[in-house]
Amino acid sequence: MDPQRAEPAPAAPAPLVAIASVILSMALVAVGNGLMFAYIPVRLGVEGIDPTWAGLIVTGLSGGGLAGCVLTGPLVRRVGHARAFMVLSALIALSNTAIGAGAYPLVWLAARALYGFAICGLFVVAQSWLNDAVENTIRGRVLAAFYIAYIAGLGIGYMLLALVDIHTVAVPLIGVAFTALSILPVGLTRLAQPPAPVAASVALGRAWRTSPVGLAGMLAVGGLSMSLAGFAPIHATAKGYSQEDVALLMASMPLGTLVLQFPLGWLSDRTDRRKVLIGTTLLAAAAGLFAIGFDGGALGALIVIYLLWDGATETVYSLASAHAADRADKSEMVALSSSLLFAWSLSGFVVPAIVTGLSAFYGTQTFIYVSVALALAYALFVAWRTVRARPVPMPETGSFQPMTAQAPLPVELAFAGEDEKHVP
């Protein structure tokens, strides 16, 4: 054969050390994020600022995240994945710096909205980069490592709050430091960047026709996740728990994800996934009811309750995502994922806004009642769909993967290549 006519050799797989650089960067970001999540409500409580402001700050964060879903695609198209990662990390550092300037609620509201925009964008960049770099044979393991690393980073950040004097600027400075450190692995990586992306369309109607249970799950779990993560430390602070207690409570919650996701995911791969969804959602509702019963009680009991509550919520996210993939063709995955991500972000903005408004009248425990009602409503909807619609066979696209509701969906997300944008 003429060597000049020989076909080019296939590209070598990305080295694991290069892939690990992106995972390490996001884990470092998570440490700072966890610390700031726990710090803000505690500091506002110490300053005697009305808890309504803490709720508004959670809502602002979610609103910024919604904008990040829409605007990250154009940013990456303009400068590429690595530079976009650095820009978004710089925005998080800027947000933390503004918080370090003093306890000014309006400034903090704007700063956390900026953070919401940047962290959502970082997840879109990181996950789309990883999905482009890895082969199908290791994709599940790489994404599992990504989520576990991020969850571990959040837990470390939560625990750090107990070790830092919140009356100084130490916490925001530590947040800035971890964000700056997160830039180094990506800045030094030799991982090839994906080609310039094209934003995938958001088609909620098509997503509903593909998987009503999946879309409704994103609309439920976006609000559930943001309410629990955002308002649990606010409520604990308002109930008089110490800085160390709040830090321990928040640090324990991610363990629920590690405890529950794998066994429930394994079970869902072997039976009708909707039945596991119903049980998991009811577990989340039950945990919320126990949180009401033990509200203000022994810290140990609350840790167990919130651990199960958070783990069940995160697992609902994973199961609903997998169920949607069960019913989608491979050619539909990009548009479906973008639609689910948008639905999750929309709920993560609207539900905390509702909770914030109601909390002004009914107190900081409002988020528990809203979360229980939302979980029960979704469980009833899935039960109705289970009776009405027969299960479908599980194709290759529908295998369970561990995920966290603090991160967008682990596929191409807001991006599609040029060859995918014309998919009907």
Image (cartoon, rainbow, N blue to C red):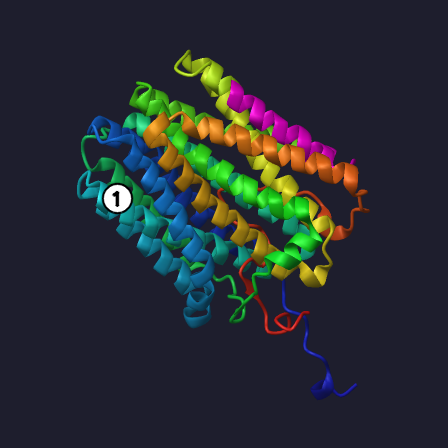
Q: Is residue 288 magenta?
A: yes
Q: 48 above or below 27?
A: above
Q: Position of residue 208 (x, y in %)?
A: 65, 53
Can residue 378 be seen here?
Answer: yes
Q: Position of residue 264 (x, y in %)?
A: 67, 32
Q: Quadrant of residue 42?
A: top left
Q: Which kind of residue does numbered mark 1 sit on?
A: Trp
Quadrant holding the C terminus = bottom right
Please tell me which residue is depicted at 45% across the width and 66% down the height of the picture.
76
Q: Position of residue 159 (x, y in %)?
A: 37, 28
* Label 1 Cα neighbours within 10 Å, binned few <14 / some 14-19 / many ≥20: many
Q: Is residue 93 left or right of residue 120?
A: left
Q: Quadrant of residue 274?
A: top right
Please tell me which residue is depicted at 48% across the width and 52% down the height of the picture.
123
Q: How many marks?
A: 1
Q: 281 above or below 82?
A: above
Q: What is the magenta range? A: 264-289
Q: 359 above or below 344?
A: above
Please tell me which residue is depicted at 72% across the width and 55% down the height of the picture.
328
Please tell me which residue is depicted at 33% across the width and 49% down the height of the picture.
113
Q: Secondary structure at mark 1?
A: helix
Quadrant holding the N terminus = bottom right
Can residue 404 be seen here?
Answer: no
Q: Label 1 belongs to which residue?
A: 108
Q: Is residue 287 magenta?
A: yes
| Main SS class of the magenta portion in the image | helix
Q: Position of residue 193 (x, y in %)?
A: 51, 66
Which residue is the extreme one toward the top?
298
Q: Decide which of 307, 366 is in the foreground and name it.
A: 366
